[in-house]
Amino acid sequence: MSEDSLFLSQAFDQMQDYLLSQELFWSLSANLPRLTPGATLLALTRLRAADPTLAPRFDAELEAVRARWRLAWERKIAREAANRLRLWSQALQDASHAEGQGADPGASDLRGRVILQLLLQEAPHLPERAALQNLDALFRAHFSPGAFVWQAIYAPAFPPASFWFLYGKYQNSRIVK
């Protein structure tokens, strides 16, 4: 069982409790990422690419969550999007302050940016979209397009038109003034 399928199994087993709680980041077993809507969407997106025969089961479970717990799901998405936007902004500020020191947004920062993109695809009306566009404009100014930065098996699930930031490298120079 892959990490994504293990995560999704545990996530859907605990989804109702999670959605009805006040927690944004819900602990699963020790070696898995914490449960959030974004982490769920990320795991499902990667699973669709890595194991398309297993993904439909989890797609159906997500549809059931959306149908039964729509309001709770949307509230968690809104909270997570605000949190992920703040973290992405901070990562870009940290990279700009470390100019000349080889700093760039790291793997966990890119994971958070991917999750933010997935959340905005899930809930396109969120106000974070405008702020993200401004941050992306700054980031793009110092980004060199290139190869997909994650494992190649996941590339089909993250098309360059939407996930351009996974296709290249940040050039170490000031991006936030």
Image (cartoon, helix red, strand yellow):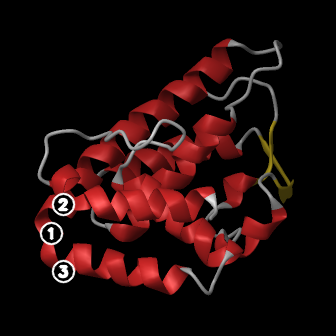
Residue contact at pointers 3 and 1, CB within 8 angstroms:
yes
| Left or right of residue 78: residue 29 | right
- Of 124 and 78, which appears nearest the observer? 78
At 14% from the left and 40% from the top, the residue drawn is 22
Taking the spot 82% from the left edge, 34% from the top edge, the residue there is 171
Residue type at mark 2: give it.
Gln
- Quadrant in the picture for residue 145: bottom right
Give the residue at mark 2.
16
Within the image, what quadrant is residue 138 found in?
top right
| Percent coordinates x, y for residue 27 in the rendering | 36, 39
In the rendered image, residue 114, in percent from the top left (x then y), is placed at: 56, 53
Q: Is residue 145 left or right of residue 85?
A: right
Left or right: 70 as drawn, with respect to 166: left
Q: Nearer the viewer, mark 2 or mark 1?
A: 2
Which residue is at the far right? 147
**In the image, what residue occupies the spot 48% across and 36% down?**
30
The answer to whether the residues at label 2 and label 1 have Cβ atoms under 8 Å apart is: yes
Residue type, label 3: Ala
* Marks 3/2: CA–CA distance: 12 Å
Q: CA distance from mark 3 to mark 1?
A: 6 Å
The secondary element bearing badge 3 is classed as helix
* Quarter of the C terminus within the rendering: top right
Q: Which mark is residue 67?
A: 3
Q: Secondary structure at mark 2?
A: helix
In which quadrant will I find the N terminus? bottom right
Q: Amino acid at mark 1?
A: Trp
User: In this orientation, does residue 130 appear?
Assistant: yes
For image coordinates 49% across by 53% down, the residue present is 115
Q: Which residue is mark 1?
A: 69
The local crowd at label 1, few if under 14, some if 14 to 19, many if 20 or more residues have their Cα within 10 Å, is some
